[in-house]
Amino acid sequence: MPATRRPPAVLHTVTIDLGARSYPIVIGTGLLGAAETWAGLPRAAMAAIVTNTTVAPLYLARLRAAVQPHYSHVLEVVLPDGEEHKDWPTLNRIFDALLQAGADRQTVLFALGGGVIGDMTGFAAACYMRGVPFVQVPTTLLAQVDSSVGGKTAINHPLGKNMIGAFYQPQRVVCDLDTLATLPAREFSAGLAEVIKYGPIADPALLDWVEAHVEGLMAREPACLAHAVRRSCEIKAAVVGQDERESGLRAILNFGHTFGHAIEAGLGYGRWLHGEAVGCGMVMALELSRRLGLVSDAYAARLRRLIAAVGLPVRAPVLGPDNAARYLELMRVDKKAEGGQIRFVVVDEAGHAWVRAVPDALVAEVIDACSGA
Ligand code: NAD
Ligand code: GLY
């Protein structure tokens, strides 16, 4: 059942400061279906809402009705659902629909869905006629706290996740917390992985807060959701504002992702959710940090307990008979790798994170220690 309709309420607005490309992240309730939410966007004759077969029956009609007053024509593009469809053929369906409908350079794309829809629609917006405006309307927790913010857009390649893409910022991000009511429990937990991530890399107080509010978060209490989304967006906006194109600092947002991407690619996209792989990847990155003497046994155990408490896996899958070698092979196809040397985000206990190269032998020890039943 779609979430109940209620009058719009903006609870927080977080600005992402990128000079002329700055934009607001609007967080609230009842936002999706309110015409005023969509006022003030670039003027255009046509809007195109890109979504998928799961989200369309829940929210497409509501968003369509709310954007309709601002455009003469609203095109709907409904894609198949799933990480396994974050690929060239599916991306091309967006271009097919835009061209067939006569979409021009002013056409505004709306990405209605989770991170898969957001990343693909953003990439389509970056490419179509060399760039059209787009708006992120994230409907998963993961997309509200992470993927819709910061302008990373991409599709997967069979040889590596998010390998084909562009930095391209949206005009606006609208996080309607009401949409989280229909999210399956497993997807909700996956989103919490990215919320937890901001603690060890940037904000020990957020880590304490998440630990103290696990029950409220898991019960999706509105106040807990609002705080988690706002604080996550503030931290991400601050990082992206300093390093939009990941020449340095922004890489810390990939804590746990090097291991996590290997899990996703190694098992086949879609078997583990992205957030599940990131949660388990953080357990592995913490074990690496522990073996490097950066965090104590107690800190690594604390994080592992928290990740498990929000319903995420903490043991990594075995990727074949030569497990560590397979992980290492997959991790070499990582955007942080330099000259074939894999680089990892590591943390200390004070909320600092940085990227460093680590000898393969040590990484293999971590993989052996963290994977299997
Ligand atoms: P997703 O987009 O696959 O959505 C998860 C599932 O929930 C899908 O089945 C979707 O249809 C469904 N869904 C979405 N909203 C719903 C709702 N309100 N109610 C019910 N069902 C709903 O996955 P995700 O976790 O949102 O995003 C993961 C993707 O995001 C990955 O591809 C990852 O690489 C990408 N990502 C990108 C960035 C970035 O900075 N661009 C950051 C993190 C992750
Ligand atoms: N999710 C990582 C980033 O946006 O940089």
Image (tube, rainbow, N blue to C red):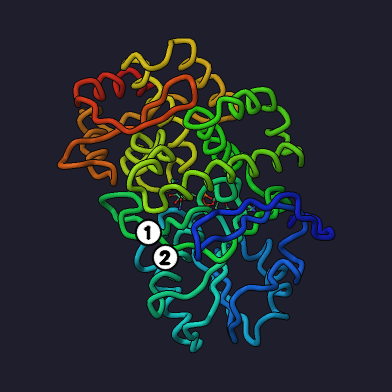
Q: Are marks 1 and 2 in contact (CB under 8 Å)?
A: yes
Residue at coordinates 58% horizontally, 41% vertically from top-left?
232
Residue at coordinates 31% horizontally, 17% vertically from top-left?
292
Residue at coordinates 72% horizontally, 36% vertically from top-left?
224
Residue at coordinates 52% horizontally, 64% vertically from top-left?
170
Find the distance from the CA under tag 1 to the CA under tag 2. 8 Å
Across and down, in percent, residue 343 comes to 27, 34
Which of marks 2 and 1 precedes in the sequence?
2
Up-down: is 188 above or below 319? below
Q: State the residue lying farthest toward the front.
A: 19
Q: What type is the residue that disc 2 sits on?
A: Phe
In the image, is 8 to the left or to the right of 162?
right
Q: Secondary structure at mark 2?
A: helix
Q: What type is the residue that disc 1 sits on?
A: Ile
Mark 2 packing: few (<14 Cα in 10 Å), some, or many (20+)? many
Q: Which residue is mark 2?
A: 123
Q: Which residue is mark 1?
A: 155
Mark 1 packing: few (<14 Cα in 10 Å), some, or many (20+)? many
Q: State the residue lying farthest toward the left.
A: 339
